Every structure is written in structure tokens, then in C-alpha cells.
Amino acid sequence: MPSAAAPAMIDELARALAELDGQGLKRRRRSVDSPPGARVRVDGRDYLSFCSNDYLGLANHPALIAAAQSAAAEAGVGAGSAHLVAGHHRRHDKLEQALAAFVGLPAALLFSTGYMANIGVVTALVGRGDAVFGDKLNHASLVDACLLSRAELTRYPHGDLAFLEAKLQACGAKNKLVATDAVFSMDGDLAPLPALLALCERYDAWLLVDDAHGFGVLGAQGQGSLNQFNLRSDRIVYMATLGKAAGVFGAFVAGHSTLIDWLVNKARTYVYTTATPPMLAAALSASLQQIAADDWRRARLKELVAQLKAGLAGLPWSLLDSATPIQPLLVGANQAALRLAEALRERGILIPAIRPPTVPQGTARLRISLSAAHAPADVEQLLGTLRELAG
Ligand SMILES: *Cc1c(COP(=O)(O)O)cnc(C)c1O
């Protein structure tokens, strides 16, 4: 409670928050009382949820839970120190080798989060006097990484290869890096990775691929977007997160072994932070086995995407063009998106309204995310409720 004696800076924050609220932009948190899944208990009420990035439904899988429990009993719950001090556990090592083998790259390095991985990679590879190029719809962590690097940043219009090529051609910097989401997190569409790689080859740039939403989902067995496009190059820096389809927490970077060695030495978000708990590495090793083995999870996702697309035809809102489990329903105005999300919530369905600055002005949307944890009846329930609200 701001009191009469609150310093002016507190009053200023309160005024700015009230302004956000007036624009329909103030964020609020809800407290969850259940494991992740198609059905969740939030603030004491049960909902059908389309909010999670747990695309394969692994976050509450018994094999992952058992692996975490037995590793905790054996290795404790905390790593105790940074990787370069004494926090690098044998389980981290094993997981890194398994991840590298799975994505078909020579070496891999674990980071605590995807946000930290992006910051660490970009700032370790480019700096003052260098140049970075990023798609305008890139995830905030890539944008922040590029800004923090102090390299000159060019944000190119979404997917505009001609624009990017002109900028690369005109660029005289020694070190160049192109950074892109592989699957754009708020739109669900894919980056033109083969064409981006061709440009990076031609103009001698690194290509940083952020596969947060592709790993586990795309590729023959969930190996991700490089596998999907059959891409291979020593200039690719591959980053994937482990808190989405993998169902746990963390991230990894994979690529040439010299690159990984450089990151061990120079990525500040790797060097100057506590190692993630070994119990999470154990859960992730179990997750990796499920990802590779459970083709039915990816098949289920494809069926649910097709069902949603077919069922939405004729309703007043349109889906953006996405073949991934991220299916954004475009609404437009902030308040209209909030109202639709609220009407669904009243009817027992949770879908987040995504508003600026996360997405461009005028493109507020409901970000439906599907999971192998959903049954066709869950999607039917969503479609029925949307029809009711439209009619
Ligand atoms: C979620 C996400 C991240 C951040 O990953 P965390 O592990 O949650 O920090 C990075 N990039 C993209 C595209 C993401 O969607």
C-alpha cells in the first residue's frame, strides 16, 4: 500500500501502472495448484488449458518425475556452484553428449535458461564494431542479447530476405551474426532457415537458430528444425530450450566443438552463474528418451492442429497461418482480446491474450497452444465454446 510518505518514485510507478491498466496492458498472475496438463486448477477453479508450451505433455510424465526424484536422493537438490568451479556434475556431461548426438551436432553446452543462452552466445560472438541482424519478430531474449552485445543491430522486417541481403552486402563489419527464431513464438510460423543459411554462407556470418518451439516437435523424431530442413553447417549456432516440449527447465547450445569450447570460456551467462541442479539433468535425460521414442505425441499434435483449423472455419476470428502447435487466433484490439479471453475463462477455458509490446500494435491475439496432453474432445470443447461466443 503506498502511504502518504511514499517517495515520489513510488507514486510515479503507481501512476504508470494505472496508465497500463487503462490501456488493457497491465499483467496479472494467477496461482496454479495442479501439475501442468490439459486440465489445471488455477485460483481454486478447474480449467481446460491451452496455455502451456509443454507441447508433448511430458512435464508431468512419471518417468521424468522418477528420474528427478532418484537423482535428488543421490545428488541433492542444488549444484552448489558454477560449472567452472565445482557445479559441473557427471549428469550434466551425459546430458550434453546425449543432446549433441540427438540433434546431430558435434558438441552441446547446457545453460540455465534460453534467455541466458541467447544472451551468452551473442555477447560471446560479437561485440563493438561487429554487426548483428535479427528478424523483427524475434523473441525478446534475442533482441536483448543483440542490444547487450553492443554490435550494430539491424532488425529486418519479418522474413524479408531481400532486405536482409541488402544490409549484409553493405556491411563492412568483420564479425556478423544473424539471429532468428526457428518457430516464431507468438505466430507459430517457421523462419526460412535454408535461405537464411545461404545468405550467411554468402556474406560470411554466423547463423544463430533459436529452436525454443521446434525442439521435440519438428524433425523426424523431434530433433528440431535443423533436422526438419536437413541443414548442416559449422556456422550454425543451434539453441533450444528444455522447458517447453522437453517439459523440464533449461536450454542448450550446440555446434562445432571449438564454438562450444569458446562459449565455456566466454559466455558470461554460463561462467558467472550457478549450475542447474543435476536432478534436472536426470529428468532431461529421461525426457530425451521419451521425445525420441514417442512418435505418437507428435502424430497427436498434428491431428489436433488439423481439427482446430477445420473447426474454426466460418468463425469471426482467423487463425494465423501456422503448422505448429502454436495457433494464434487474431482478434486485433487489446480490450477485445481481453474480453474474449475473459469470456472463455468464465466458461472454464484458459487461453492467454497476448498484447503489445509482446506482439505488434493492433494484433492482439489469443495464443492457443496445443499439446499431446490434449484429447480431440478438448479441442471440440474449445470449438463449441468459441461458436457459442461468436453466435
Ligand atoms: C521461451 C523462449 C526463450 C526463453 O527460454 P527460457 O528457457 O524460457 O528462458 C527463448 N527464445 C524463444 C523463441 C522462446 O520462446
Image: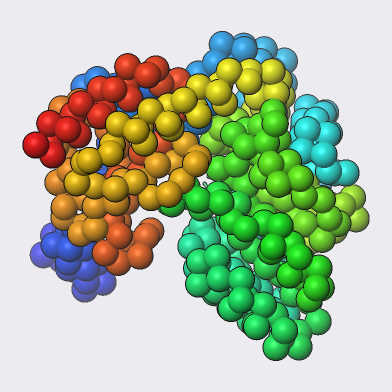
Report if residue 144 is visible in the image.
no
Q: Is residue 327 above or below residue 235?
A: above
Nearer to me, 357 or 274: 357
Q: Residue at x 17, y 43 (%)?
A: 340
In-image side of 99 versus 318 (left or right): right
Report if residue 173 is visible in the image.
yes
Where residue 376 sits: x, y (%)? 37, 19
What sort of colour scheme is used for the picture? rainbow
Please give the count of numbered marks on the rendered protein: 0
Q: Is residue 162 above or below residue 56?
A: below
Where residue 117 sits: x, y (%)? 66, 52
Where residue 231 sits: x, y (%)? 77, 50
In-image side of 112 versus 97 (left or right): left
Q: Quadrant of residue 269?
A: bottom right
Q: Is residue 69 above or below residue 4?
A: above
Quarter of the figure with the C terminus: top left
Q: Is residue 122 above or below residue 109?
A: below
Where residue 62 sits: x, y (%)? 56, 11
In-image side of 299 versus 93 (left or right): left
Q: Quadrant of residue 363?
A: bottom left
Q: Residue at x 67, y 36 (%)?
A: 219
